[in-house]
Image (spheres, rainbow, N blue to C red):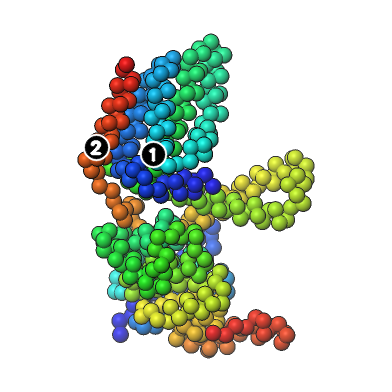
Amino acid sequence: MTPLIEVRDLHFRYEDGTQALNGVDFTLHPNETVALLGANGSGKTTFVLHLNGVLQGEGSITVCGMPVNKDNLAGVRSKIGMVFQDSDEQLFMPTVLEDVSFGPLNLGLSPEQAVQKAKSALEQAGMAHAAGKAPYHLSAGEKKRVALAGVLAMNPEILVLDEPNTFLDPPAEGNLLHLLKSLPQAKLLITHNIYFAAALANRAVFFEKGKLVADGSVEEIVQRFNWTYDSLPADLRYSAQRRF
Amino acid sequence: MHHVLVDRWSQGSTALHRRDPRAKIVALLAFLIVLATTPPDAAATLVIDAALLLSGILISALPLVNLLIRAATVLPFSLTFGLISWLAGDTWRAVGLIEKSYLSAVAVLLLVGTTPLPLLLNGLESLGAPRLLVLVAQFLYRYLFVISEQAQHMRLAASCRHGGEHAGSRKSRFRAAAGALAVLFARSYRRAEGIHRAMISRAFGGHFSLLFPPTFRASDALFTAAVAAFLIVVRIQ
């Protein structure tokens, strides 16, 4: 099966000298949902920003058969939909409909086609009723859904979700989980919430100091790196654990 | 926030709001040229120009007092130059400076308050304004929201850790404010970088396409021609 994403020996150093990625190899196959786990600053977000060419390091990246380079950026960005951790960074147009149409218009669709795509994506995300609203009037859960709709309107083959459950209350988190589960795209999920990861992902990889050090099921990775609340005293564990 | 309020004004649906942005930009240009060439002692002409602006504000249903107060932002600058002219013995020049700058500010606010910014910038671009300049204006406006939001967060955080608005010496308060300003710009820069990343991730190629591009109709041409003709007739009489 041809992989959707193939990354080989990826290195990246920030301008301040921080070595963020130190030889990452990674493959994503169709229909897979992979959780990217690891400590803060381990390189997860830096890694996904390379997949659509926002950051450019050393090494090779192929997305849907296209090498990620300056000549292919438009094509690559139409294949990868990226939902950022903070929805406010993603919603910058005056109304929800205009914001969701932003991507399709940039792909060269006519305004009529872009509106059609945007309405259908808003419908899919359960946010059709908010089309005329200003994004800053929405709740955190609604903003997340609109940000997702903005990406779905571009018909991507891969969804990259950077801590999608941040700022969400439990019901909104549950709704988002249902929505993500229903989407057919292959997904890359950055999260610190192992319950969210276990409910959504069929594979997990673990980042440590800019390297991908383990690959397996979510349960295997969680056990291997003790990525749980188990070190807490028993009386604190109940409040820290959540179930879906 | 000033820009949020003006943004809200621009979402109206009056006859003036519905005019093509290009028609309104050209009418504004005609107004500014006529105003700039009007002698400062031509009181009747200036009163008619002011009446034209007043009728524009009333037609567009913008809050009159609020708009006039906001236009007064230019007064500290024009008063300074007016004072210099007055001290130099040129009283009419001083009066003209203040009158004209205030009327210009009202006219610009009337345009901005009746035209959503994306449409306004698109209109400027199609009238030949440099694309780079238009793009910078577009980003600048968007980032104003970012800076005000960051400033509000920081103010809230500071007030939670502060002994009161007047706590500490004047010097220490000044130092804290200067430090906060530096942090505000650093945080806003980071935030703006995040927005830019999100934009290019959605295939942004340096051009804002409009979802509902305006169409220049015969009524728009008539509007511009009527405003320009009226201003010229008033000016030459």
Foreground tag (2 vs 1): 1
The chain letter for the residue carrying disc 2 is B
Does residue B178 appear to the left or right of B134 in the view shown? right
Point out the image quarter for the C terminus of chain B. Answer: top left
Give x and y (percent) for residue A41. 56, 69
Tell me which numbered mark, 2 or 1, is placed earlier along the sequence.
1
- Badges 2 and 1: C-beta atoms under 8 Å apart? no
Q: Is residue B101 above or below residue B137?
A: above
Residue lying farthest left? B218
Q: Residue at x 54, y 12 (%)?
A: B88
Q: Residue at x 52, y 36 (%)?
A: B65
Give x and y (percent) for residue A178. 45, 81
Q: Nearer the viewer, residue A128 or B150?
A: A128
The chain letter for the residue carrying disc 1 is B
Give the labeled residue for mark 2: B221
Give the labeled residue for mark 1: B59
What type is the residue that disc 1 sits on? Ile
Give x and y (percent) for residue B174. 70, 41
